[in-house]
Image (cartoon, rainbow, N blue to C red):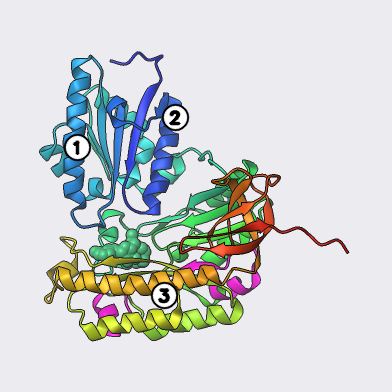
């Protein structure tokens, strides 16, 4: 076994969404005081965490095959007198719980998303092979209370304010795996934001499955106003939003609060009203278009992003065309698009008219060709403009810096003097599908 004085090595493999990226960072933070330092190699880790995602097809199978690979490392280490604790976290852990422990005896611990703050204790218990091995039923409140304030890595940070979902879209597992909607109390969110600002963070992205459904003692708009008043916080973003939670106040704030960045990720999922109804999205195409036109009326330059699913059960060519038309009409700066994947246990999995893999693939290619063209066009439209760029680090080439535009674009620009956290004017001279580049704008002397 590892000597208590030797630094212990932690390997975390993260699958899936931004929430999981955030959760992995929190797990790393919570384990740091126990002497765990992150390693890039699973084979020399004392503790391995697979932070799993249940969204994608075959996600569970992938986890089991990864466990198989880890078991070989574990056995080799055991022969050398060293231990390896294998932990499964995230949504697959939540959904499969006992089944994982039964099917994969190499796994020491299964921990659901609400119990990460108990990790140190659970890991100690697992190492001693005593006590409960499952800990998936703690309340979200406890989790938020017990986690230490996270050390930011740079000038941008995620801040989780809301978890779970009560919307029950028929294709989605989140309401089952992440549980009921829970908002973190306002005072806690503000305290963490102040602490992040003190540590040099300039841009925060509020995270939640339905972030704009926030109700932690204040409305989401009230929370944004409070955050905007914190000195040092210069930029605020949020994701993921649900269209039915886009209140008049929230839309209006996009026109009046300069710290709220002109960027919005607002999943639409489909352009067909019949499909939206079958998805139980609670909005139709006209409702979505109306939000967009009101946002553009008060913030004409706002960059829009979305999530779209093609091949939902029963989707006809005509209904897919309605999605294409919505995309042409709205025009997005970026987007995530998916082939519908049947998730056992969700209502859509049992629907008649499952679309063939071939048709889904063709529709996805067609949709992505349009979305990528729109993304390239949005980036190209910045050429010739001067944008305020938040400096996040050194660029790829010597004499270059890297940063983030208000529209969440990655920006490379020529400069040597700007410091991380500065917001500097950059004249954009070139663009690609995924980024823009330019040079630091020099102020003309009068
Ligand atoms: N709460 C957010 C929302 O309402 O859009 C995001 C939730 S989900 C983690 C992120 C995206 O994954 C969804 O917006 C949806 O487009 C996609 N997704 C979820 N379940 C899916 C499924 N069964 N098949 C394909 N895509 C799916
Ligand atoms: Fe899933 Fe729908 Fe909830 Fe988003 S709103 S997490 S897609 S159920």
Residue 418 visible in rendering = yes
Q: Which residue is mark 3?
A: 244
Vertical placement of 377 versus 1: above or below?
A: below
Who comes first in sequence, dot 1 or dot 3? 1
- Label 1 CB-ligand 1 distance < 8 A: no
Q: Secondary structure at mark 3?
A: helix
Dot 2 or dot 1: first in sequence order is 2
For mark 1, give the secondary structure.
helix
Could you say which is closer to the camera, residue 365 or residue 122?
A: 365
The quadrant in which the C terminus is found is bottom right
> Dots 3 and 2: beta carbons under 8 Å?
no
Asked if the stretch drawn in magenta spans residue 266, the answer is: yes
- Which one is in front, 91 or 296? 296
- Was residue 162 drawn as part of the magenta stretch in this picture? no
Q: Position of residue 360 (x, y in %)?
A: 21, 71
Rendered image quadrant of residue 162: bottom left
- Of tags 2 and 1, the one toward the viewer is 1
Left or right of residue 80, residue 356 in this image: left
In the image, the segment drawn in magenta is 250-279
Question: Of the residues under marks 3 and 2, which one precedes in the sequence?
Answer: 2
Quadrant that contains the N terminus: top left
Q: Which residue is mark 1?
A: 67
Residue 268 appears in view:
no
Q: Classify residue 413 as left or right of residue 165.
A: right
Q: Is residue 101 left or right of residue 112?
A: left
- What number is the disc on residue 32? 2
Q: Nearer the viewer, residue 74 or 36?
A: 74
């Amino acid at each position: 076994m590892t000597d208590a004085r030797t630094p212990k090595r932690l390997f975390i493999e993260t699958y899936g969404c931004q929430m999981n990226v955030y959760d992995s960072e929190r797990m790393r933070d919570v384990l740091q005081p126990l002497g765990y330092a992150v390693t890039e190699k699973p084979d020399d880790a004392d503790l391995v965490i697979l932070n799993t995602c249940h969204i994608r097809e075959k996600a569970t199978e992938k986890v089991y095959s990864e466990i198989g690979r880890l078991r070989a490392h574990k056995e080799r280490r055991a022969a050398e007198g060293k231990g390896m604790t294998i932990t499964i976290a995230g949504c697959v852990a939540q959904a499969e719980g006992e089944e994982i422990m039964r099917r994969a005896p190499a796994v020491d611990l299964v921990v659901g998303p609400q119990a990460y703050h108990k990790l140190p204790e659970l890991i100690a218990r697992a190492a001693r092979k005593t006590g409960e091995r499952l800990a998936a039923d703690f309340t979200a409140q406890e989790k938020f209370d017990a986690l230490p304030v996270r050390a930011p890595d740079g000038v941008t940070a995620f801040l989780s304010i809301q978890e779970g979902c009560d919307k029950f879209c028929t294709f989605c597992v989140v309401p089952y795996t992440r549980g009921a909607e829970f908002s973190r109390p306002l005072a806690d969110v503000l305290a963490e934001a102040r602490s992040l600002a003190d540590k040099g963070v300039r841009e925060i992205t509020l995270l939640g499955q339905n972030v704009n459904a926030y109700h932690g003692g204040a409305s989401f708009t009230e929370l944004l106003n409070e955050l905007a008043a914190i000195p040092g916080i210069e930029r605020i973003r949020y994701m993921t939003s649900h269209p039915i939670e886009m209140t008049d106040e929230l839309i209006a704030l996009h026109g009046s609060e300069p710290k709220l960045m002109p960027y919005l990720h607002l999943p639409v999922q489909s352009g067909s009203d019949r499909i939206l109804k079958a998805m139980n999205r609670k909005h139709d195409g006209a409702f979505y278009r109306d939000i967009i036109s009101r946002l553009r009326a008060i913030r004409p330059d706002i960059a829009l992003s979305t999530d779209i699913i093609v091949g939902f059960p029963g989707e006809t060519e005509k209904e897919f065309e309605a999605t294409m038309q919505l995309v042409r009409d709205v025009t997005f700066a970026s987007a995530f698009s998916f082939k519908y994947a049947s998730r056992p246990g969700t209502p859509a999995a049992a629907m008649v008219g499952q679309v063939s893999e071939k048709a889904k693939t063709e529709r996805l290619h067609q949709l992505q060709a349009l979305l990528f063209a729109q993304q390239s066009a949005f980036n190209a439209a910045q050429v010739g403009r001067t944008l305020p760029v938040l400096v996040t680090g050194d660029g790829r080439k010597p004499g270059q810096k890297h940063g983030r535009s208000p529209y969440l674009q990655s920006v490379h620009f020529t400069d040597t003097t700007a410091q991380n956290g500065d917001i500097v004017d950059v004249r954009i001279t070139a663009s690609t599908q995924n980024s823009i580049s330019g040079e630091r704008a020099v102020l003309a002397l009068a």
